[in-house]
Image: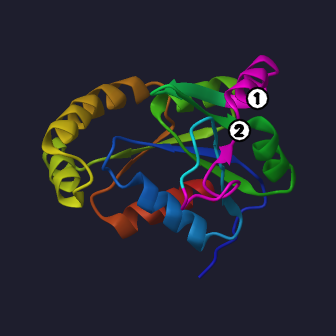
Amino acid sequence: MAENRNNKAGLYVISGPSGVGKSTITREVIRRCEDVYLSVSATTRPKSEQEVHGRDYWFISREEFEHGIEQGRFLEWAEVYGNLYGTPRDKVEQRLEHGGNVLLEIDVQGGRQIKQARPDAVLIFIMPPSPEQLAERMYKRGRDEKEVASVRLGGAEKEIEQAKGWYDKWVVNDDLEKAINEVIDIVHS
């Protein structure tokens, strides 16, 4: 069932530690709300065979990305493992001008940049019920080796600490359906 309860467009950021469920929550909010759009990031990393330009990422050259940085074309950007990633300002502003709410799923560093560029943005941090449950989720999803998962868990505390003072809303994902509905309520409030 698609929801559309909001007449005023807004910019929303979802962040949280790896394994907390932010991608699942983001996908469900987008699926259930006809007035909420996911921002597609730009990147300089190579496109995989499964990815689609404009759906998964905007795949651009490093030169084009760096020129975009100089021109102020990104609301936020970062270099991760030698590749640049960023949120194209024009795409977000076009959606907002047409009355759509825009949702970004990015890290805390990006969220802070967004808040500085757009103080009206609402930053939502997804919290695990506990560090133990986050660890259990990470191991169960099986994407990471135990050593990598341990490093990510160590980063979770740091990420939570960095979010304090910047993030407007905190949603504990102890029940997925409840967490999805909380985010939908934040977007439509």
**Boundaries of the magenta span:** 49-75
Residue 64 percent across, percent down from the top left: 76, 29
Which residue is farthest top? 70
Which residue is farthest bottom? 1
Give the answer, above or below, for where 141 lies relative to 4.
above
Quadrant (top left/top right/bottom left/bottom right) for the N terminus:
bottom right
Residue 67 percent across, percent down from the top left: 78, 22
How is the structure coloured here?
A: rainbow
Estimate how packed mark 2 is, as few (under 14), some (14 to 19) or many (20 or more) residues with alpha carbons within 10 Å: some
The residue type indicated by label 2 comes to: Ile
Can you identify the residue that label 1 sits on?
A: 64
**In terms of depth relative to the viewer, which is nearer, 96 or 183?**
96
Label 2 SS: loop
Can you identify the residue that label 2 sits on?
A: 60
Q: Is 50 a magenta residue?
A: yes
Residue 147 percent across, percent down from the top left: 15, 37
**In terms of depth relative to the viewer, which is nearer, 70 or 60?**
60
